[in-house]
Amino acid sequence: MITNATTSNIHMDKKQLKALMRRSDRPGLKYLISWVALLVVTGIPVMLSVGTWWFIPAILLYSGCFAVSAYALSHECAHGTAFRTRWLNEAVFWVTSLLYYEEPLHRRYSHASHHTHTWIEGEDNQMPYAPIPLTFAGWVEEILGLGLYWHQTKMFVLHSLGIFSDNVKRVTPESELPRMQRNTQICVAIYVGLAAVSIWAGWMWPVYLIVLPRVLGGPIMNAFILMQHVEMAENQPNIVQSTRSFRTNWFFQFLYFNMNHHIEHHLYPTVPFHALPKLSAKLGDQLPDPDPGFLSTHWEVLKITIRRSLGRNDRSRKIRQAFSDDLTGADHDRSMA
Amino acid sequence: MTAQWHDACATDDVDDEDLITLKLADQVVAIYNTPEGFFATAGMCTHEDESLDGGLVMDGVIECPLHQGRFCVRTGKALSAPAVENLVTYELQVRDGRVWVRV
């Protein structure tokens, strides 16, 4: 089952759409420079506060800025829409995928499957690890991202050795598997090399500025990712029913590269992140109202999972939610977002 | 079946740096208007059989609208994942403001 704008009965004037799809390096570079500047500004207090109580708030702030945008920029580059210049897009894709902890080619093929078969059980390779409908225990599992760490670590080991699961082979052309193996070996060499040099030189900055922030910022990043489709309908071709857009403030929009416009992104993935607000305005009333802000929408999701775990009414009046019959659950090999 | 020349469209039917798709001899064909001239390839992406009609033409490359697989419009060569299989290309001529394609 294919999921796209046509199967969602969404229409847009071709010329207007093509204008929104146009690429430019400028917005991506502006975002990239702003993000690096933000990491410098929030990273300096981390390094200066090591060994004090101030380290805790400093690293939490830095971690959120680090992990959410590393994920979001890697995602944008996976689509090739972050920059017009291809080598720049691919260079940033490699760096941010390494920070996100996934080999870039696997990320691209896995995400392609997510777009072809959005939220289709057994076909979408990027559904949650926890059973759907999500319970509170499942919510904790998804937010901590333990399944993702295990899955990705397993991928790094197996793919380095040239061992690919049937699920990976299902979404990756056979001719690409040797390249995926070589890429994975390069990723592992970079991780191991950085660790070895850090131990030899006595560096602690990779721990404070990369490893800890990826782990501590992971739950915030996962909260953003989970919001994209959680509690939405599975196994049907309409993206509007399977996907959620939500309002949020300018800072979260910045960190998340406008992916709060997630229905719009799935309908027209060739439109770059910086044009998504304009796309949303052009689509107008073909789209449902976005859910309330990031925190309030996620709070609703959390309450739903708690009520469901207690056997109580799990319906929400505040966010869009599919009926339980449309939340069928699945347990195949999956990786998130 | 022997390939034949088909009067596909007027040159004005395809915007600058854009494409149209149409059916010729039972084949979906994409016709591109680029600064380097007009070109024709198969109109469906070789990755997931998505129509290239809604794709982006930029710098002589067509990008599939679904997964952003990229192909050279001149040679049909697949340039980046997830596209790995080349597009079929067709001979094309422009005569008196009309685009002719051999399919």
Image (spheres, helix red, strand yellow):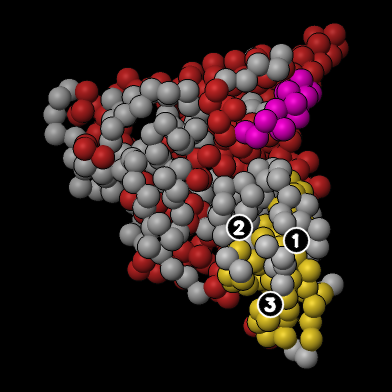
Kind of residue at disc 2: Met
Label 3 sits on residue? B6
Left or right: where does residue A146 sit relative to residue B56? Answer: left
Name the residue tied to disc 2: B44
Nearest to the observer: residue A228 or residue A104: A104
Chain ID at mark 1: B
Spot occupied by residue B30 in the image (x, y as percentages of width and height): 66, 67
Mark 3 and mark 1: Cα distance apart in space: 15 Å
Q: Amino acid at mark 3?
A: His
Inspect the image, locate mark 1, and give the three-letter code of the amino acid beneath it: Thr
Q: Position of residue A119 (x, y in %)?
A: 40, 40
Quadrant where the C terminus of chain B is found in the figure: bottom right
Asked where in the image residue A272 lies, by quadrant, the reply is bottom right
Outermost residue toward the left?
A: A312
Horizontally, residue A309 falls left or right of residue A26, namely left
Residue A17 percent coordinates (x, y): 56, 69
Find numbered disc 1 in the image and state the secondary structure of the residue it sits on: strand
Along the viewing direction, whichever of B8 and A314 lies nearer the viewer = B8
Task: Please tell me how crowded label 2 is: few (under 14), some (14-19), or many (20+) other residues with Cα within 10 Å.
Answer: many
Q: Is residue A301 left or right of residue A181?
A: left
Secondary element under disc 2, as helix, strand or loop, is loop
Residue at label 1?
A: B89
User: Which quadrant, please, contains the N terminus of chain B?
Assistant: bottom right
Q: Residue at x 33, y 59 (%)?
A: A288
Closer to the N terminus: mark 3 or mark 2? 3
Stretch in magenta: A172-187
- Earlier sequence position, callout 3 versus callout 1: 3
> Same subunit under labels 1 and 2?
yes
Main secondary structure along the magenta-highlighted residues: helix
Q: Is residue A149 above or below residue A223?
A: above
